[in-house]
């Protein structure tokens, strides 16, 4: 049995075939507008390159930037009825109040505030106004809105009103898709609400995209189940993606980091993924991307669902190199995927970062003789500045003075030096398709993040055990094998401002998918 990993990027669709821990083949194909044909072409190429029997493919794992791009490019977003349960509090800050005007208009700016919600200690803020919910449902029918989000004040403490509101909406509006904020974001009303609204606006696109992936596999004669990677480096089943497309945000950089960990065997490292236009930088912790602890901006909208702590700089293989040796400028403009047509080493007319890498001997691609007319001092100055840019971003990703290795992945990673300050740079085999490798090795996860009251015989240890049991149950329900599940994150934070000795507990577990666990046993 084999695993196939596919990463659908904005420019390229990368694919790999894995047998156990061995990468049999890795290829790059062009991403297409319809998604299906690009994934189909990548599948056909990687199957041919590996020489495997497609009937022996056990599972296909797909990473995609489709939903992130939809928000950033303001495309394929549906109108949403955004219902907040919280009056009389919060009236001055309506739903989507801090959204950019263009995206707020795209999702319809249908904001509703209703009596309901809870205090921070779980007491009722005000009873739920069910009559108003039914009135809003009538308005939803009249406007032809097909998706709604429901956000209750402190629903992380008590979600009963959110659940009741969904019941009423489904009674009144047949076929309405309802997203509850308690399923999407974490604590923090506005950011959690924004995440729920954004998720609701992407549901139709999610269904279309999942169908496209299924059709591509069907056309390629691959009958194995497929899964989609989420932004914490783990897998979701197709139906889960249909319900929670926002969980795929930033899955591209996450896949690259997971792939880097797999290809090197390192659990603690800094990963630099160098593409054609930008370099994404993040840190590995226990073999998974370190998660951001603050709210994350997606297309100008502030959200608070889990995201990897990754940042980008405008330096890639296609970055333009301009100026003089005394004042050299690299990026952020780039020729991107046209680098093989426009870079000097390929017979083009544009001096790029790739040309600098070839001129300094870091890379052996194209025709180095075509660089004879380039000023040697400009090459030296540009190479020095590129190194400084990488050093700056790597230092930013470090959280301690302890030396950790730097893993360079992505097609443009030939730009990186072999040493960054006191840190060694590692380029593993198959570094150019590390993102697809990361998709192929992804595991199933389960997660709990809620508030416990340490009273009436409930101890810290028993609360942690309960949270872990909940996370394990989620992972098993999603398809993980119980015996393979391990805890990768466990934290508790006492909340001094809440009564009852309250503490917020977060536990995350991962495990192998059933079919893949069997494959590992066979390979062993």
Image (cartoon, helix red, strand yellow):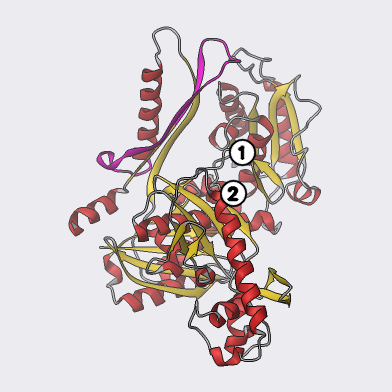
Q: Is residue 98 visible?
A: yes
Asked if residue 269 lies left or right of residue 313, the reply is left
Asked if residue 264 lies left or right of residue 420, the reply is left
Of the pair 123 and 371, the residue shown nearer to us:
371
What residue does disc 1 label?
A: 294
Extreme-top residue of the structure: 456
Compute the Cα span from label 1 to label 2.
Answer: 25 Å
> Where's residue 30, x and y in %?
53, 75
Q: Relative to residue 113, is residue 482 depicted above or below? A: below
Q: Is residue 214 visible?
A: no
Q: Relative to residue 17, is residue 187 depicted above or below? A: above
- Residue at 60% across, 34% down: 181
- Residue at 38% across, 68% down: 16
Q: Residues within 10 Å of mark 2 (few under 14, many from 20)?
A: many
Specify start and end residues of the magenta stretch as a single range: 477-506
> Where's residue 297, x and y in %?
67, 46
Of the pair 401 and 91, the residue shown nearer to us:
401
Q: Relative to residue 150, is residue 105 depicted above or below? A: below
Of the pair 328 and 168, the residue shown nearer to us:
328
Identify the mark at residue 203; answer none if there is no mark. Answer: 2
Discs 1, 2 touching: Cβ within 8 Å? no
Which quadrant does the C terminus fall into? bottom left
């Amino acid at each position: 049995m084999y695993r196939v990993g596919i990463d659908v990027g904005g420019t390229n669709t990368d694919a790999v075939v894995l047998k156990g821990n061995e990468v049999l083949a890795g290829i790059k194909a062009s991403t297409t507008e319809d998604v299906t044909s690009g994934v189909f072409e990548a599948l056909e190429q990687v199957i041919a390159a590996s020489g495997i029997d497609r009937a022996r493919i056990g599972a296909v794992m797909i990473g995609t930037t489709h939903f992130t791009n939809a928000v950033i490019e303001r495309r394929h977003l549906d109108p949403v009825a955004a219902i907040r349960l919280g009056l009389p509090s919060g009236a001055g800050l309506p739903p989507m109040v801090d959204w950019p005007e263009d995206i707020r208009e795209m999702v319809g700016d249908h904001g509703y505030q209703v009596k309901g919600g809870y205090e921070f200690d779980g007491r009722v803020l005000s009873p739920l106004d069910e009559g108003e919910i039914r009135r809003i449902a009538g308005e939803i029918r009249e406007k032809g809105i097909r998706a709604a989000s429901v956000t209750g004040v402190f629903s992380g403490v008590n979600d009963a009103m959110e659940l009741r509101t969904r019941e009423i909406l489904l009674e009144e509006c047949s076929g309405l898709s309802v997203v509850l904020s308690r399923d999407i974001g974490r604590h923090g009303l506005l950011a959690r609400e924004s995440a729920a609204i954004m998720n609701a606006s992407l549901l139709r696109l999610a269904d279309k995209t999942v169908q496209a992936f299924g059709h591509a596999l069907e056309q390629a004669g691959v009958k194995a189940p497929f899964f989609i990677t989420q932004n914490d480096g783990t897998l979701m089943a197709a139906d889960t993606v249909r319900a929670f497309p926002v969980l795929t945000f930033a899955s591209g950089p996450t896949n690259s980091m997971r792939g880097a960990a797999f290809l090197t065997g390192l659990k603690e490292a800094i990963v630099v993924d160098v593409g054609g236009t930008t370099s994404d930088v993040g840190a590995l912790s226990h073999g998974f991307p370190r998660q951001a602890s603050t709210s994350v901006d997606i297309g100008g909208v502030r959200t608070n669902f889990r995201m990897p702590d990754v940042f980008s700089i405008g330096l890639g293989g296609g970055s333009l190199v301009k100026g003089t040796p005394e004042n050299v400028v690299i990026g952020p403009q780039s020729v991107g995927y046209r680098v093989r047509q426009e870079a000097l080493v390929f017979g083009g007319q544009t001096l790029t970062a790739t040309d600098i890498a070839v001129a300094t001997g870091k890379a052996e691609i194209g025709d180095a003789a075509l660089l004879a007319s380039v000023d040697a001092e400009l090459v030296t100055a540009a190479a020095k500045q590129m190194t400084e840019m990488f050093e700056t971003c790597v230092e930013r990703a470090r959280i301690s003075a302890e030396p950790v290795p730097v893993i360079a992945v992505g097609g443009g990673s030939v730009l990186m030096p072999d040493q960054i300050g006191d840190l060694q740079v590692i380029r593993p085999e198959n570094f150019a398709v590390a993102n697809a490798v990361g998709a192929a090795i992804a595991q199933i996860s389960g997660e709990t993040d809620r508030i416990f009251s340490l009273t009436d015989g409930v101890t810290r240890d028993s609360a942690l055990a309960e949270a872990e049991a909940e996370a394990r149950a989620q992972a098993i329900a999603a398809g993980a094998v119980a015996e393979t599940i391990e805890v990768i994150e466990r934290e508790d934070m006492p909340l001094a401002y809440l009564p009852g000795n309250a503490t917020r507990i977060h536990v995350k577990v991962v495990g192998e998918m059933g079919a893949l666990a069997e494959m590992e046993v066979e390979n062993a």
